Image (cartoon, grey):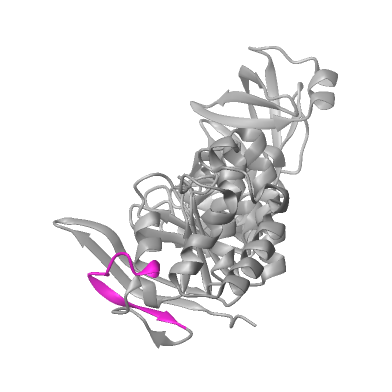
């Protein structure tokens, strides 16, 4: 049985000349975990993966596999397998593509055949072993790359944007297969992607990166529903989280423009005690209730925003509405049934209601989430 491996990064710094690509990153990836490193292009996620693989050496910091320091260990000695965005196959059959790295490790012919057959079965290629890779679809070529990694029986799988070149339909197919395969293998997988859907659907935990630092680590539920910064809230979600800058009044009110949108003496007192005269209210587009008429609401329990509908976007399964209020813009997500029942048109006046338990508070300057006793 292949041993399970945890991966620990301690204060990793990576500099390329004067450019600091990784800025003191620490991570602890548990054994058998599907861990995703998520972020936009240029944030440092691939560099971090290459440091784990041993393809790059950190400028500062240490890398541990199961508490063993592997920082200075060569890539070939780390027992990892990488799957890249581009599959880089040999111009030969599926069988040979999976087998060549095994023969180079001096495995017997019977062992190679056993490993190739099992890996091909896991990814659904068992009937294509004798087919030349030039005759395969793009999705099957990526399956070959994955099978080649599986056949090595590594301790850790490192996947770098493996679905990027696939079309949307193929991406959905391979995404579900990856999760199934990982559950069967029960091995540690570190998965780098810029695609939030891949990270949210595949990972047990996610590290969200931004300009060489990790903004937040948590389960998909935690990072989506309780972002620690406006960056995380904005980066996750389709659309990203709404952030409305509002004024904190000493009379217990929070105002957007000159309109009171929330009223709670306890909350405003906490904000004022933290030296805040303004605050960012964060909430998800799907956590809103929309009506066409002004409504009487309990402003101590709900945020109520009156505005004008400016843009209507149809996405097939839902609508996204852009609403302007008090010089700010926010987005509301509606299913087609609710949208049609409201009979909405652009420039209609509307009222948006958000339950207080779906609202987070963020610092207007740092963008960090504000911890309030009642909300935590």
- Farthest left residue in view: 17
Residue 187 in the image, given as x and y percentages of width and height: 61, 72
Front residue of 318/332: it is: 318
Q: What stretch is highlighted in magenta?
A: 52-65
Q: Can residue 218 be seen in this view?
A: no
Quadrant position of the C terminus in the picture: bottom right
Q: Is 127 located above or below residue 244 in the figure? A: below
Residue 154 in the image, given as x and y percentages of width and height: 53, 72
Judge left or right: residue 205 versus residue 121.
left
Q: Is residue 339 found inside the magenta-colored segment of the image?
A: no
Residue at image point 62% right, 63% down: 116
Q: In which quarter of the image is residue 311?
A: top right
* Total numbered labels: 0
Residue at image point 58% right, 64% down: 150
Residue 125 in the image, given as x and y percentages of width and height: 68, 51
Front residue of 225/180: it is: 180
Q: Is 43 located above or below residue 326 in the figure? A: below
Q: In which quarter of the image is residue 188?
A: bottom right
Quadrant position of the N terminus in the picture: bottom right
Q: Is 45 located above or below residue 3 in the figure? A: above
Q: Quadrant of residue 20?
A: bottom left
- Farthest bottom residue in view: 68
Front residue of 39/188: it is: 188
- Farthest front residue in view: 109
């Amino acid at each position: 049985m292949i041993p399970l491996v945890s991966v620990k990064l301690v204060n990793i710094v990576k500099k390329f000349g004067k450019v600091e690509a990784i800025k003191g990153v620490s991570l602890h990836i548990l054994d058998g975990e599907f861990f995703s490193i998520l972020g936009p292009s240029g944030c440092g996620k691939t560099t971090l993966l290459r440091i784990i693989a041993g393809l790059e050496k950190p400028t500062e910091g240490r890398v541990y596999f199961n508490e063993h320091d592997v920082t200075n260990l060569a890539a070939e000695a780390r027992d990892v397998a990488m799957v890249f965005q581009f599959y880089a196959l040999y111009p030969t059959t599926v069988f040979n593509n999976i087998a060549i790295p095994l023969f180079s490790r001096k495995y017997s012919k019977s062992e190679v055949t056993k490993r190739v057959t099992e890996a091909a079965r896991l990814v659904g290629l068992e009937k294509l072993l004798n087919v030349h890779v030039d005759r395969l679809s793009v999705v099957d070529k990526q399956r070959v790359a994955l099978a080649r990694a599986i056949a090595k029986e590594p301790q850790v799988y490192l996947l770098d944007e493996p679905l990027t070149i696939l079309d949307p339909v193929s991406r959905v197919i391979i995404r579900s297969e990856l999760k199934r395969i990982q559950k069967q293998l029960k091995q540690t997988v570190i998965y780098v992607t810029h695609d939030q859907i891949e990270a949210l659907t595949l990972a047990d935990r996610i590290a969200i990166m931004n300009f060489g630092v990790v903004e937040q680590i948590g389960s998909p539920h935690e990072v989506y529903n309780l972002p620690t910064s406006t960056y995380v809230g904005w980066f996750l979600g389709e659309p990203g989280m709404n952030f409305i800058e509002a004024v904190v009044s000493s009379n217990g009110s929070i105002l957007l423009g000159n309109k009171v949108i929330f009223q709670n003496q306890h909350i405003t007192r906490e904000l004022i005690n933290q030296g805040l005269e303004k605050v960012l209210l964060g909430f998800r587009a799907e956590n809103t209730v929309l009506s066409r008429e002004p409504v009487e609401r309990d402003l101590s329990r709900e945020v109520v925003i009156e505005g004008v509908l400016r843009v209507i976007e149809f996405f097939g399964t839902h609508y996204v509405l852009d609403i302007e209020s008090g010089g700010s813009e926010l987005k509301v997500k509606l299913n087609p049934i609710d949208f049609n029942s409201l009979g909405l048109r652009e420039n209609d006046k509307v009222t948006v209601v958000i339950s207080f338990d779906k609202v987070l508070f963020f610092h207007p300057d740092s963008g960090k989430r504000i911890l309030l006793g009642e909300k935590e």
